[in-house]
Amino acid sequence: MAATDHTRAVGHNWAGNVTYGAHRLVEPRSLGELAELVAAEPRVKVLGSRHSFNHLADTDGVLVSLASMAGDAEVRRVDDGTIRVPAGIRYGDLVPILQRWNVALANLASLPHISVGGAVQTGTHGSGDHLGTLATQVSAVEMVTGTGGHLRLERGQHDFDGAVVGLGALGVVTHLELDVEPAFDVAQTVWEGVEWDDVLTDLDAVTSAGDSVSIFTTWQDADAIDMVWVKSRSTRPPTTLSLPGARPADGERHPIPGIDPAPCTLQRGVPGPWFDRLPHFRLAFTPSVGDELQSEYLVPRTDAVAAVEAVRSLARVIAPLLHVSEVRTMAGDDFWLSPATGSPTVAIHFTWKPDEEAVRGLLPRIEAALPHSARPHWGKISTMAPQKIAARYPRWDDFAALRSHLDPERRFTNAHLSRLGL
């Protein structure tokens, strides 16, 4: 059966701030059809869950959806510690399969609505001092390259660390093998009444209070933290946040104060399955606010306090445009374009109100105030100069060479990558 070809308008991203420039959307039904499409089209990009807030996934050529590749959509166990998944599957749709096998991923992002391939390719992450980005779960990556050929790279092989966080610039990632472990339970507790001065005096003590910790603030008060969400495996002792004024919330909470917490996973220290606690939001609901924009900057842990203080100094101008800001941590990794490459990392995330002109007007002030080590999230809004971004990745030139090797005809290049020098 031929690939489904949508010549109507391709539409826009999840947030509605990006209207795709592709002239058509194609849904190949097999790896063979995908390879033929890539070899025939001068410009191709993959469209995942549309959760990028910039033009990284856009193209003036053909957008490809992997949703119709039924014959290649099966999730299967490779061995007791490894699964093979189609890149287009969402984490929330993968979970029921893992649940039947009684296995788990070590970590999840804050919402289960995103695709595995898109999250991995952009270095997306959850939180946890000893937990890496979602890309660190990948043990093998399979893709169709710019020549239409099939490529498989395994952990430890040459170029593997360059290909996992690849920004869609190396090929169409079709499948990933992921590390899994026996399923586990997690309990999460929300703490209130905490001040920044107390947290920044010993940030390590706060972020190590659980397996996954998120610090939320609206920056309405430059001194106050609205909430600290602590998620801990049931094998850990009960969570205690030993800070002046810290108290457990007396009910369920949404990360944005005052919003109905129904979309959120269960709190108040009640243990539950890993997949129903590690994300902040449940698959059946619209995550976060829905009507929003996002930015995020990641810094080495050694620069974390300076980065928070820089943002704190701008609280007065940030707060009117902001829904909420979140501070999270992750272990370092070796992926060439991972925002956590080289060292343990702290991320400062912004969920903005949907005023892109005002947000873009403010971001240069934030970027100038942050330490020079700050790296913007690949899938979110940033105004940082491309040469500054490139300078913050020691393996940038190696990635550019790999991209030239795997995509010599520049099929996966778009205007966004070109601005970055790729």
Image (cartoon, rainbow, N blue to C red):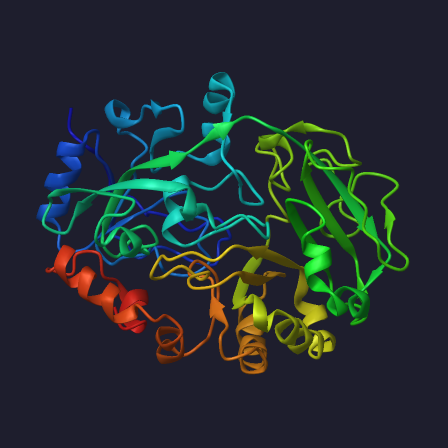
Residue at x-position 39% and y-position 23%: 80
| Residue at the image point whose x is 36% and y is 57% from the top | 335
Q: Seen in the image, is 325 located left or right of residue 165?
A: right
Which quarter of the rendered picture does the N terminus lie within? top left
**Which residue in the rendered view is the most extreme toward the right?**
245
Residue 231 against residue 371 in the figure, above or below: above
Q: Quadrant of residue 221?
A: bottom right
Query: For this view, does 7 lie left or right of residue 355?
Result: left
From the viewer's perspective, tell me whether residue 200 is left or right of residue 4. right
The quarter of the picture where residue 235 lies is top right
Q: Residue at x 52, y 65 (%)?
A: 298
- Identify the residue at horizontal 37%, vertical 58% (top origin): 334
Residue 266, position in %: x, y? 72, 33
| Residue projecting furthest to the top | 100
Q: Position of residue 376 (x, y in %)?
A: 47, 67
In the image shown, does 188 or 36 lie closer to the viewer?
A: 188
Q: Percent x, y for residue 284?
A: 59, 31
Q: Is residue 346 above or below residue 16?
A: below
